[in-house]
Amino acid sequence: MTRVIAGSAGGRRLAVPPGNGTRPTSDRAREGLFSTWESLLGSLRGARVLDLYGGSGAVGLEALSRGAEHVLLVESDARAARTIRANVRALGLPGAELRTGRAEQAIAGPAPESGPYDVVFLDPPYAVADEELREILLTLAGNRWLAPDALATVERSTRGGDFGWPAGFEGLRARRYGEGTLWYGRAASTCDNAS
Protein backbone atom coordinates (compact mmCIF):
# COMPACT_ATOMS: atom_id res chain seq x y z
CA MET A 1 0.00 0.00 0.00
CA THR A 2 0.98 3.58 -0.61
CA ARG A 3 -0.89 6.76 0.25
CA VAL A 4 -1.86 10.19 -0.99
CA ILE A 5 0.50 12.56 0.80
CA ALA A 6 -1.31 15.92 0.81
CA GLY A 7 -4.35 17.84 -0.37
CA SER A 8 -8.03 16.98 -0.15
CA ALA A 9 -7.35 13.21 -0.11
CA GLY A 10 -4.18 13.44 2.00
CA GLY A 11 -3.53 10.34 4.10
CA ARG A 12 -5.86 8.10 2.07
CA ARG A 13 -4.40 4.70 1.16
CA LEU A 14 -3.91 3.52 -2.40
CA ALA A 15 -3.67 -0.04 -3.64
CA VAL A 16 -0.62 -1.01 -5.69
CA PRO A 17 -0.66 -3.42 -8.64
CA PRO A 18 0.29 -7.02 -7.87
CA GLY A 19 3.53 -8.46 -9.22
CA ASN A 20 6.70 -6.81 -10.46
CA GLY A 21 5.25 -5.10 -13.53
CA THR A 22 5.31 -1.64 -11.94
CA ARG A 23 7.73 0.26 -9.72
CA PRO A 24 5.82 2.75 -7.57
CA THR A 25 7.43 6.14 -7.01
CA SER A 26 8.34 6.26 -3.31
CA ASP A 27 6.52 8.61 -0.93
CA ARG A 28 9.78 10.52 -0.44
CA ALA A 29 10.29 10.95 -4.19
CA ARG A 30 6.63 11.99 -4.66
CA GLU A 31 6.99 14.59 -1.91
CA GLY A 32 10.04 15.97 -3.71
CA LEU A 33 8.28 15.79 -7.08
CA PHE A 34 5.28 17.81 -5.93
CA SER A 35 7.39 20.28 -3.98
CA THR A 36 9.39 20.95 -7.15
CA TRP A 37 6.31 21.19 -9.37
CA GLU A 38 4.68 23.63 -6.97
CA SER A 39 7.83 25.75 -6.70
CA LEU A 40 8.13 25.92 -10.51
CA LEU A 41 4.40 26.42 -11.21
CA GLY A 42 3.34 28.28 -8.07
CA SER A 43 0.44 25.86 -7.61
CA LEU A 44 -1.17 22.84 -9.25
CA ARG A 45 -4.62 24.41 -8.88
CA GLY A 46 -6.37 24.14 -12.24
CA ALA A 47 -3.45 22.35 -13.92
CA ARG A 48 -3.79 19.57 -16.47
CA VAL A 49 -1.43 16.67 -15.75
CA LEU A 50 -0.42 13.79 -18.04
CA ASP A 51 0.98 10.65 -16.36
CA LEU A 52 2.15 8.37 -19.17
CA TYR A 53 3.08 5.33 -17.08
CA GLY A 54 0.32 5.36 -14.46
CA GLY A 55 1.24 2.31 -12.34
CA SER A 56 -1.01 2.59 -9.28
CA GLY A 57 -2.14 6.10 -10.23
CA ALA A 58 -0.42 7.55 -7.15
CA VAL A 59 1.21 10.51 -8.94
CA GLY A 60 -1.91 11.47 -10.91
CA LEU A 61 -4.22 11.08 -7.93
CA GLU A 62 -1.82 13.09 -5.77
CA ALA A 63 -2.03 15.85 -8.39
CA LEU A 64 -5.85 15.82 -8.24
CA SER A 65 -5.74 15.86 -4.44
CA ARG A 66 -3.54 18.97 -4.64
CA GLY A 67 -5.91 20.83 -6.95
CA ALA A 68 -5.17 19.74 -10.52
CA GLU A 69 -8.25 20.09 -12.72
CA HIS A 70 -7.65 17.05 -14.91
CA VAL A 71 -5.27 14.08 -14.94
CA LEU A 72 -4.87 11.65 -17.82
CA LEU A 73 -3.31 8.39 -16.67
CA VAL A 74 -1.97 6.04 -19.34
CA GLU A 75 -1.17 2.44 -18.43
CA SER A 76 -0.42 -0.58 -20.63
CA ASP A 77 -0.52 -3.29 -17.94
CA ALA A 78 -4.06 -4.64 -17.44
CA ARG A 79 -3.57 -5.38 -13.71
CA ALA A 80 -2.17 -1.91 -13.10
CA ALA A 81 -5.06 -0.33 -15.03
CA ARG A 82 -7.55 -2.22 -12.81
CA THR A 83 -5.71 -0.92 -9.75
CA ILE A 84 -5.89 2.65 -11.07
CA ARG A 85 -9.65 2.30 -11.66
CA ALA A 86 -10.12 0.98 -8.12
CA ASN A 87 -8.05 3.83 -6.64
CA VAL A 88 -9.97 6.45 -8.64
CA ARG A 89 -13.28 5.00 -7.37
CA ALA A 90 -12.03 4.75 -3.78
CA LEU A 91 -10.89 8.39 -3.66
CA GLY A 92 -13.82 9.82 -5.59
CA LEU A 93 -11.78 12.75 -6.91
CA PRO A 94 -13.22 14.30 -10.08
CA GLY A 95 -11.01 14.87 -13.10
CA ALA A 96 -9.28 11.49 -13.52
CA GLU A 97 -9.25 9.83 -16.94
CA LEU A 98 -7.62 6.47 -17.67
CA ARG A 99 -6.48 5.23 -21.07
CA THR A 100 -5.21 1.69 -21.36
CA GLY A 101 -2.48 1.00 -23.86
CA ARG A 102 1.09 1.97 -24.61
CA ALA A 103 2.15 5.57 -24.06
CA GLU A 104 3.21 5.94 -27.71
CA GLN A 105 -0.26 4.92 -28.90
CA ALA A 106 -2.07 7.18 -26.44
CA ILE A 107 -0.33 10.31 -27.75
CA ALA A 108 -0.08 9.40 -31.44
CA GLY A 109 -2.85 11.77 -32.53
CA PRO A 110 -3.50 15.44 -31.96
CA ALA A 111 -4.00 16.82 -28.47
CA PRO A 112 -7.43 16.39 -26.89
CA GLU A 113 -9.98 19.12 -27.59
CA SER A 114 -10.05 19.80 -23.85
CA GLY A 115 -6.62 21.37 -24.20
CA PRO A 116 -2.90 20.79 -23.74
CA TYR A 117 -1.19 19.62 -20.56
CA ASP A 118 0.75 21.81 -18.14
CA VAL A 119 2.72 18.92 -16.62
CA VAL A 120 3.83 15.56 -18.02
CA PHE A 121 5.32 12.76 -15.91
CA LEU A 122 7.17 9.83 -17.46
CA ASP A 123 8.10 7.03 -15.06
CA PRO A 124 8.50 3.96 -17.27
CA PRO A 125 10.18 0.70 -16.36
CA TYR A 126 13.91 1.36 -16.20
CA ALA A 127 14.38 -1.02 -19.17
CA VAL A 128 12.72 1.55 -21.47
CA ALA A 129 15.50 3.35 -23.34
CA ASP A 130 16.10 7.08 -22.91
CA GLU A 131 15.79 7.48 -26.69
CA GLU A 132 12.22 6.14 -26.54
CA LEU A 133 11.36 8.75 -23.91
CA ARG A 134 12.92 11.52 -26.00
CA GLU A 135 10.76 10.41 -28.94
CA ILE A 136 7.66 10.51 -26.73
CA LEU A 137 8.52 14.05 -25.59
CA LEU A 138 9.03 15.16 -29.19
CA THR A 139 5.70 13.59 -30.19
CA LEU A 140 3.94 15.35 -27.31
CA ALA A 141 5.38 18.68 -28.44
CA GLY A 142 4.79 18.07 -32.14
CA ASN A 143 1.18 16.98 -31.63
CA ARG A 144 0.57 19.98 -29.34
CA TRP A 145 -0.18 17.94 -26.23
CA LEU A 146 1.94 20.35 -24.15
CA ALA A 147 1.06 23.87 -23.08
CA PRO A 148 3.71 26.53 -23.70
CA ASP A 149 6.41 26.15 -21.03
CA ALA A 150 4.93 22.86 -19.80
CA LEU A 151 6.93 21.02 -17.16
CA ALA A 152 8.22 17.55 -17.98
CA THR A 153 9.59 15.14 -15.39
CA VAL A 154 11.29 11.86 -16.20
CA GLU A 155 12.15 9.26 -13.56
CA ARG A 156 15.16 7.08 -14.42
CA SER A 157 17.47 4.69 -12.62
CA THR A 158 20.21 6.52 -10.75
CA ARG A 159 22.66 4.02 -12.28
CA GLY A 160 21.74 5.06 -15.83
CA GLY A 161 23.62 8.34 -16.05
CA ASP A 162 22.29 11.72 -17.09
CA PHE A 163 19.03 12.01 -19.02
CA GLY A 164 19.52 14.04 -22.20
CA TRP A 165 16.56 16.27 -23.09
CA PRO A 166 15.52 16.42 -26.76
CA ALA A 167 15.57 19.59 -28.85
CA GLY A 168 12.85 21.97 -27.73
CA PHE A 169 13.21 21.07 -24.04
CA GLU A 170 15.37 22.77 -21.45
CA GLY A 171 16.78 20.70 -18.59
CA LEU A 172 16.14 22.43 -15.27
CA ARG A 173 17.41 20.18 -12.48
CA ALA A 174 17.71 16.63 -11.22
CA ARG A 175 17.03 15.15 -7.79
CA ARG A 176 18.13 11.71 -6.63
CA TYR A 177 15.93 9.55 -4.41
CA GLY A 178 17.64 6.23 -3.69
CA GLU A 179 17.55 4.06 -6.83
CA GLY A 180 15.71 6.69 -8.88
CA THR A 181 16.49 10.17 -10.14
CA LEU A 182 13.85 12.72 -11.16
CA TRP A 183 14.91 14.84 -14.15
CA TYR A 184 12.97 18.11 -14.54
CA GLY A 185 12.68 20.00 -17.80
CA ARG A 186 10.53 22.60 -19.50
CA ALA A 187 9.12 22.57 -23.02
CA ALA A 188 9.59 25.57 -25.24
CA SER A 189 6.38 27.11 -26.54
CA THR A 190 4.34 24.59 -28.54
CA CYS A 191 4.67 26.78 -31.62
CA ASP A 192 8.47 26.50 -31.41
CA ASN A 193 8.32 22.72 -30.88
CA ALA A 194 5.95 21.99 -33.73
CA SER A 195 8.36 23.04 -36.48
Image: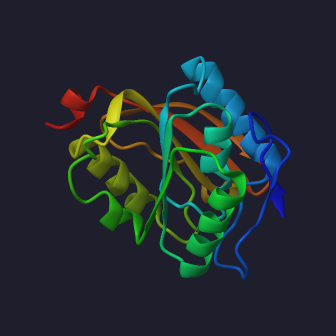
Q: Nearer the viewer, residue 157 or 141?
A: 141
Check the image and report above or below for 88 versus 48. Answer: below
**Looking at the image, which residue is at 78% across and 53% down?**
26
Q: Nearer the viewer, residue 96 or 138?
A: 96
Q: How many numbered circles does the render carry?
A: 0
Residue 143 in the figure: left or right of residue 181: left
Check the image and report above or below for 112 versus 189. Answer: below
Q: Residue furthest top?
A: 42
Residue 126 in the figure: left or right of residue 188: right
- Residue 35 lies, in percent from the top left, at 71, 29
- Residue 30 lies, in percent from the top left, at 73, 44
- Residue 61 lies, in percent from the top left, at 64, 48
**Looking at the image, which residue is at 13% across and 36% down?**
195
**Looking at the image, which residue is at 33% across and 37% down?**
116
The N terminus, quarter of image: bottom right
Q: Nearer the viewer, residue 142 or 56?
A: 56
Q: Nearer the viewer, residue 7 or 18?
A: 7
Residue 28 in the figure: left or right of residue 49: right
Check the image and report above or below for 104 versus 38. Answer: below
Check the image and report above or below for 52 versus 6. Answer: below
**Looking at the image, which residue is at 64% across and 20% down?**
39
